[in-house]
Image: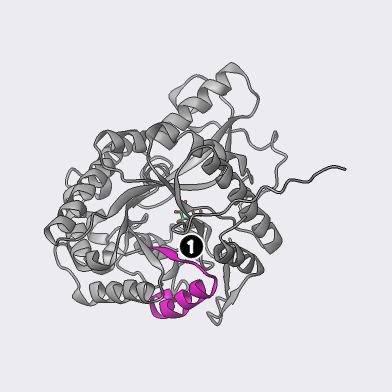
Amino acid sequence: MGVIIICMYEFPSDFLFGAATSAYQVEGSNSLSDWWEYELAGKLKYHSGPACKHYELYEQDFNLAKELNHNCHRLSIEWSRIEPEEGKFSSQELNHYKKVISALRSRKLEPIVTLHHFTNPIWFSKLGGWSSKKASDYFLRYVSKAVDALSGEVQFWVTINEPMVYLYHSYLLGIWPPNERSLIKTHKAKNNLLCAHINTYRLINSIYKNNNLNKPLISIAQNMQAFVPCIPTLRNKLASYLRAKSFNLEFIERSRQARALDFIGVNYYSRSLVELRGWGLKNFAMDVCEGKHSTLKKNSLGWDIYPEGLYDVLISLKKYKLPVFILENGICTEDDSLRWSFIREHLDKLTEAIKSGIKVLGYIYWSLIDNYEWDKGFAPRFGLIEVDYNTYARTIRESARKLAKVCLERKL
Ligand code: BGC
């Protein structure tokens, strides 16, 4: 008689399970941000407007996260609210974020706070944005105020969300503000973002030290893609390797060299099928196979669903000997059973990586609620919780209940 071996994985008791949001995508009415100005200038088809009204409804949203057995929540704070004019700080907005963080703490949801998630104050972009020499100084002045105000209640900080994604969209492809298409500005902005991260890391540590607080854990959120050769020719393999090295690993490596990472924050969604059509710089950075070799299921934006990639990118981090935290992993879809199979399959790959020796602090799904998906508007539905944009009513999806069971039982 055959024996069936069921291999179960039990998550450690301090493993964090939660979901993420970002201020601009959910709060609504962030009218002092460069993204809002960009929308009003008619550069985008969709206007974020009141978004999900999360600025008013945050307590209700955190109640739902609690109901789903989460024990952490990732959010971002909006620089343009906190520093609406250069050098002038709003105590009202700082108090708002203090209340938001206390609301998480009182529900036993560990706050993971991001300081920069794609948007900037209008005054900052007028002064040259991230390609300006003074970018990092401006950012640090804001960080100092924000961290001083919130330090007592925050243990996890994320300095910058997806620097490479931001650079590609905003400075190379020019489809996000500030609408640049310049290799020189991309290069400058990249160095400034890195410098801002490293100096922010040091500043946060010194604020905590001066206030006699325990050392916080600080990282970036690095978008990592699985770069897979569409046909395994030597040149496609070489291009995939170089793409992973620069897109996935460069920020991590340089921050690590500066001793400015306590863990590695990973955002993982999909793979890129690499096809090198020529030998120019542009080919190495951009060429992707237009899908003719992909037979995989896709999300509603057409991205391949590729859980194996999560395992591969995690293994590629082993050499850094740092704990990893999955800060975003998610799917936009109208088919909620596909959402659950996406989550389940990615959790399986995550536990395989843990068994292969990767230390993982937690898993955060993107996103807690449906929200404004940047230049794609409100159509993509990433949420564990559905938002009705007419009434702003929230409805928990079935996939969220299934994940809630894993969070409660802490077993797969
Ligand atoms: C970003 C989010 C975005 C999500 C889905 C991540 O790259 O951090 O802001 O909504 O992906 O595209």
Side (left or right) of 75 relative to 139: right
Side (left or right) of 404 relative to 30: right
User: How many residues crowd around disc 1 within 10 Å: few (fewer than 14), some, or many (20 or more)?
Assistant: many
Side (left or right) of 125 relative to 133: right
Residue name at image x 33 percent, y 69 percent: 31
Q: Quadrant of the N terminus?
A: top right
Residue name at image x 69 percent, y 57 percent: 338
Above or below, 304 relative to 127? above
Given residues 279 and 395, the one toward you in this image is: 395
Q: Label 1's element?
A: strand
| Residue position marked by numbered label 1 in the rendering | 18
Instruction: In the displayed orientation, state which residue is furthest to the front.
Output: 1
Q: Quadrant of residue 27?
A: bottom left
Given residues 17 and 97, the one toward you in this image is: 17
Residue 35 rendering spot, x and y as whole percentages: 37, 60
Residue name at image x 55 percent, y 63 percent: 407
The answer to whether residue 116 shows anywhere in this view is yes
Verify whether residue 395 appears in magenta.
no
Number of labelled discs? 1
Instruction: In the displayed orientation, state which residue is furthest to the left.
Output: 210
Instruction: In the displayed orientation, state which residue is furthest to the bottom.
Output: 391
Task: Please identify the dominant SS of the magenta region.
Answer: helix
Highlighted range, magenta = 53-75
The answer to whether residue 182 shows anywhere in this view is no
Residue 241 rendering spot, x and y as whole percentages: 50, 26
